[in-house]
Image (cartoon, rainbow, N blue to C red):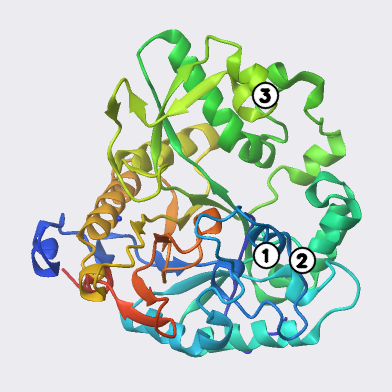
Amino acid sequence: MLLRKGDIILVFVLVVIGIKNSFCQSSGINRTSFPKGFVFGTASSSYQYEGAVKEDGRGWTVWDTFAHSFGKIADFSNGDVAVDEYHRYQEDIQLMVDMGMDAYRFSIAWSRIFPNGTGAINQAGVDHYNNFINALLANGIEPYVTLYHWDLPQALDDNYNGWLSPQIIKDFAIYAETKKYKSKQNGSLGMALDVMWFEPATNSTEDIEATQRAQDFQLGWFLDPLIFGDYPSSMKTRVGNRLPTFSKAEAALVRGSFDFVGINHYTTYYARHNSTSIIGNLLNDTIADSGAITLPFRGLKAIGDRASSIWLYIVPRGMRSLMNYIKHKYGNPLVIITENGMDDPNDPFKPIKECLKDEKRIKYHNDYLTNLLASIKEDGCNVKGYFVWSLLDNWEWGAGFTSRFGLYFVDYKDKLKRYPKDSVKWFKNFLTSSS
């Protein structure tokens, strides 16, 4: 994929009483509080945003199949249209510019480049992303490109069960090499990881150890090989011969094979030792293997206020704790917060004017950013960027359109019109304020 100018960063994968008062309640931080060159942006993904699933040669994906299976999505919707960014990206780029954002994280749909996951390149897909990236660059927005954000080409799942087969290594490498980000465009390479922070439910040794295991089986599973060349010792001990082993050559290939670590962080849970075998008998997965139970409650008391999603509890201190954990355990690698945000429910009976009043989201971002700033300035954590999830309300996987994470409200009843929520005004003030 050719660009006309600029560098491109590659990410591999994968929330009072009105805005005026909300400004007054903030901790006084703004863009200039952060180190020079710190990047602020918004994030999205192809299936959640683009739509146009049958246009310009795009192939079917596993999420097309899943979303079209009866009863899988909360509101029986799908991503066929999503929020139509495929056709409206020029409009959406202007929204980023108006806010003062520096960058945009979006994903390329593998099936737009290789409709069957491999084989002949679909030039129409390449042309679309070239045009999109060039439009971002022309407007001063730096592209952060996610190569894979869950939308596996269906053909690869049909042919060899997708990610369960070693064959996908070759096919993904061919797809990734088509872009030549690092060698030809002076790009950087990283992996975005979904990471909760965990706190021990009690001060008992059992719960403290269980908390570490919970993190090993979440973050450590992926980051330990990249830093140390092997899985966490707790995983090797508890999973045994069911856990693949790295050869010396594989360990050498994986270790250090990144320029930055992307962290998608939303919430914090309590962790406790699982003293029963019930979960192990019911499940054959990482939850059972970890021997840890993670919940957002201690007794009947929640760890924090809840957003709309049943899993998302607001615990800003977790951001600072997580950054410090990465610093001390992994040698302070370069970190970019590739996702952070909260959702409101999609209430079809609520007037749009009321939906735009998202004081809870403003407080969420203010408080998480305050903790992130403390981790950088007071603790010395090596964090260089922060991406809001998300620019727009969008199609939120199994929740469909029932969940609204966007800074901009999308009117699903009226041609997908975009309206700025109060959080847009807050971010614009945050990003343009000099003191």
Q: Residue at x 72, y 81 (%)?
A: 1
Asked whether the beta carbons under mark 2 and mark 1 sit within 8 Å of each other, the answer is yes
Measure how far apart labels 1 and 3 are at the Cα level: 28 Å
Decide: is 206 above or below 18.
Answer: above
Nearer-N-terminus badge (1/3):
1
Observer able to see residue 193: yes
Decide: is 382 above or below 54.
Answer: above
What label does residue 147 carry, if any? 1
**Other residues around mark 3 within 10 Å, as few (<14) / some (14–19) / many (≥20):** some
Secondary structure beneath label 3: helix
Measure how far apart labels 2 and 1 are at the Cα level: 7 Å
The percent coordinates of residue 209 (x first, y second) are 50, 16
Nearer-N-terminus badge (3/2):
2
Measure how far apart labels 3 and 2 are at the Cα level: 29 Å
Q: Quadrant of residue 357?
A: bottom left
Q: Mark 3 = which residue?
A: 235
Q: Mark 2 = which residue?
A: 176
